[in-house]
Structures are given as C-alpha cells and as structure tokens.
Amino acid sequence: MVTGNVGVFPMAMTRRNFIKIMCLAGGAILLKACTRADEQRADLESCQTAYAKLEAEGKLAERIEQAYGILEKCELCPNRCGVNRREGQRGFCRAPEKAMVYSHDPHFGEELPLVGQGGSGTIFFSNCSLRCVFCQNWPIAHEGWGREVSDEDLADMMLDLQQIGCHNINLVTPTHVMPNIVSATRIALKKGLHPLVVEYFQAGGGRGLRLSVSSARMEKGEVPEAWLRRRAGT
Ligand code: SF4
C-alpha cells in the first residue's frame, strides 16, 4: 500500500519501510550525539597544564634551575632590581630567596567557576613587587607578615588544599616567588597534585615562566569553561 508522496518518499511507504526509516534516522542522531560527546571528552583530555606537560617531557627540572638563576640578579618583575636574592640581598619587593606565606585556605570570593563547592585554594604570599598605596592586603604585601617556607612546605600546602576539597590552587601575587612556586608545583605533582594551578599576576606581569593558567586568560575565555566547571564540580 502506498500511503505517502512518492516525490518525498521514493519507495513505497509501508509500515515496514516507515519503521526502517525511523530506525535509520534515530541511529544517525544517536551516532552524531556520541561523536559530539567523544569530541568534547577529547577536548577536555587534551587540555593539559603546561607544568604537567613540561614534566612529562622531562623539561621542568631544568626550567626550575633557570628560574632560580634569575634570583641571582633578580629581574623577575619589571622593577629589575638586579639584587642577588640567593645571597640575602633584597630588592624593591623585600622578598627573600625563600617564599614567604601568610595563609593557605579555601576562598569563596573568587570567580564562580573557580569556587565551585569546595572553594578556591588560595595561597597568600608575603611581600609584593608593586607595593601599591591602596593595597587591600597591606600587612601582608607591604609589611611582609608571614613566614618563610621551603619549596617542600609550599608543595604540602598545595596538597593540603587539594585534600580538603579545593578545586584549584590559587596563587595570590606570585610574581616575586615564581621559582619557588614552580619548584613546589613539581614536588606536589610528584605527590599527586591534580587541581589546576591558577595565578594572579600583579599588573605589569613578571618575567619568567608562565606555567599556570592566569585569571586574565580565563576571563578572555582562553580556558574552556567546561574544563573549569568539571574541576569545580559545578
Ligand atoms: S621580584 Fe623583587 S627583587 Fe626581583 S626585580 Fe622584582 S621587586 Fe626586584
């Protein structure tokens, strides 16, 4: 029995043919959806952090050595003081060779994709290479409140934040302690660090190795939101 327009349905539209066409159409839609999901999954998987990639390529240790070398005639930031921080000299930021940390805690006031349910794992570094007169963290940035920590201690702080459920490691004003951070990140990676490391560079930026994802890159949409959301569980 022919029930349709043969111009549209060139073959006879029997019930059997109708079911066949619907099955083919359904299969095609399902296949397309699966392919899309596979593509999205591949996108997420390929979004590897630079520091993990460098470590996998065996280059991270060398970069850390280079970074510490910069401290010998410090030009980590545009101030380019030229002091030897490895021999105890201090420049404009007043930072010593070791990192100084004021606190490490979950923070719920950052961009929503960073905060999720467990908070953003902030590490507040003492001292600062900008020393703005309107600084909201004056005692930490200007007066250097905090304590010196080894790179191993810093790595343990990252792992603590991971352990208590923070979705990322959020480095607040890290420019002047970049070598310490990179070194600590490597130690933490070896101990199982998996959250994304996020950096909050001071205006003017810093010289050196951009190993993590900056908030500016996130705001410009250069980091897939799906990746951030997956990590934040939102
Ligand atoms: S990080 Fe500190 S010591 Fe180094 S150039 Fe900047 S202000 Fe000077």
Image: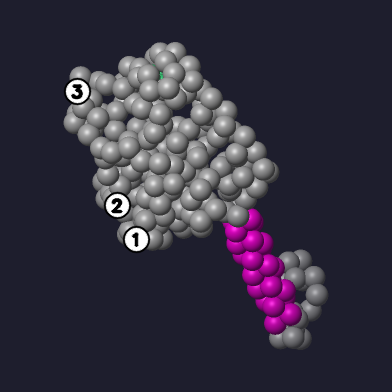
* Quadrant position of the C terminus in the picture: bottom left
Q: Secondary structure at mark 3?
A: loop
What residue appears at the point 65 percent right and 47 percent down from the top-left corner? Answer: 56
Q: Which residues are magenta?
A: 18-42
Relative horizontal placement of residue 47, taking residue 109 as reference (left or right): right
Label whose residue precedes the other's in the sequence (1 or 3): 3
| Amino acid bearing label 3 | Phe
Residue 4 is situated, as x and y percent measured from the top left of the image, at 71, 75
180, 18: nearer the viewer: 180
Q: Which residue is mark 3?
A: 134
Instruction: State the mark number for residue 94.
Output: none
What residue appears at the point 44 percent right and 46 percent down from the top-left corner? Answer: 152
Q: Residue furthest right?
A: 11
Instruction: State the mark number for residue 164.
Output: 1
Relative horizontal placement of residue 20, taking residue 208 as reference (left or right): right
Instruction: Measure how far apart labels 2 and 3 are at the Cα level.
Output: 25 Å
* Residue contact at pointers 2 and 3, CB within 8 angstroms: no
To which quarter of the image does residue 132 belong?
Answer: top left
What residue appears at the point 33 percent right and 17 percent down from the top-left corner? Answer: 92
Q: Secondary structure at mark 1?
A: loop
| Amino acid bearing label 2 | Pro
Magenta stretch: dominant SS? helix
Check residue 34 for magenta coloring. Answer: yes
Label whose residue precedes the other's in the sequence (1 or 2): 2
* Residue contact at pointers 1 and 2, CB within 8 angstroms: yes
Q: Which residue is mark 2?
A: 106
